[in-house]
Image (spheres, grey):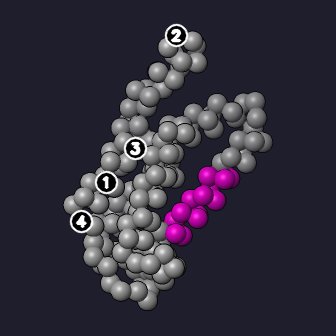
């Protein structure tokens, strides 16, 4: 849940950055932003992939452990959960494609991220990388808490 919160929080920051540049009702008119906001596009892609649970990112170990741990006893539910992951991938990749790589929308051309926005979006990316490459740093305290030793 922590990895999901980090990735989703980062995606909300992406939307907040876009909202800051335009009125909220103009968000549906966005498209082709990667031409004008390449830093935003790269960071948004990273956060999208983190939310999808790509290997090396925070959500991957959690999804892997949940799916492999439930397969033996609840195989039907595991298939349903895996299907939900595929549907989420389709939704998030469509969202990214429409906003960043699709045809240009009808909006005022925005500026790319400033240094503060780049830093703020880099924080959840760094956390996701740490959670993905070093999941035991987060799992050991949880296991100790579950065993009543913490």
Give the side of residue 27 with respect to residue 82, left or right: left
Above or below for 103 versus 45: below
Q: Residue 122, how many percent across, how many down?
A: 31, 52
Q: Which mark is residue 128?
A: 3
Q: Secondary structure at mark 2?
A: loop
The reply to whether callout 3 and callout 2 are in contact (CB within 8 Å) is no
Which SS class for mark 1?
helix
Quadrant, the N terminus? top right
Q: Residue at x 54, y 63 (%)?
A: 92
Lower position in the chain sequence, tag 3 or tag 4: 4
Q: Secondary structure at mark 4?
A: loop
The residue tagged 2 is 149
Q: Are marks 1 and 4 in contact (CB under 8 Å)?
A: no
Question: Which stretch did the figure color magenta?
Answer: 83-95
Q: Are marks 2 and 1 in contact (CB under 8 Å)?
A: no
Q: At 32% across and 79% down in the image, what residue appears?
A: 110
Instruction: Report, in whole angstroms, how far the alpha carbon at label 3 lies from the one at label 4.
Output: 22 Å
Q: Nearer the viewer, mark 1 or mark 3?
A: 1
User: Mark 2–mark 4 contact, CB under 8 Å?
Assistant: no
Q: Which residue is mark 4?
A: 114
Q: Quadrant location of residue 67?
A: top right
Gap between marks 1 and 3, in whole Å? 13 Å
The number of discs equals 4
Is 142 on the left-hand or right-hand side of 45? right
- Say whether residue 108 is left or right of residue 83: left
């Amino acid at each position: 849940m922590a990895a999901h919160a980090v990735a989703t929080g980062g995606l909300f920051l992406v939307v907040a950055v876009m909202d800051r540049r335009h009125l909220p009702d103009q968000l549906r008119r966005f498209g082709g932003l990667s031409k004008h906001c390449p830093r935003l596009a790269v960071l948004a892609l990273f956060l999208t992939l983190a939310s999808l649970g790509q290997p090396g990112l925070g959500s991957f170990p959690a999804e892997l452990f949940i799916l492999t741990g439930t397969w033996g006893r609840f195989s039907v539910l595991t298939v349903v959960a895996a299907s939900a992951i595929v549907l989420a991938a389709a939704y998030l990749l469509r969202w990214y494609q429409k906003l960043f790589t699709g045809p240009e929308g009808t909006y005022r051309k925005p500026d790319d991220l400033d240094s503060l926005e780049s830093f703020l979006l880099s924080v959840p990316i760094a956390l996701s990388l740490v959670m993905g490459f070093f999941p035991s740093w987060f799992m050991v305290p949880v296991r100790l808490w579950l065993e009543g030793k913490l």
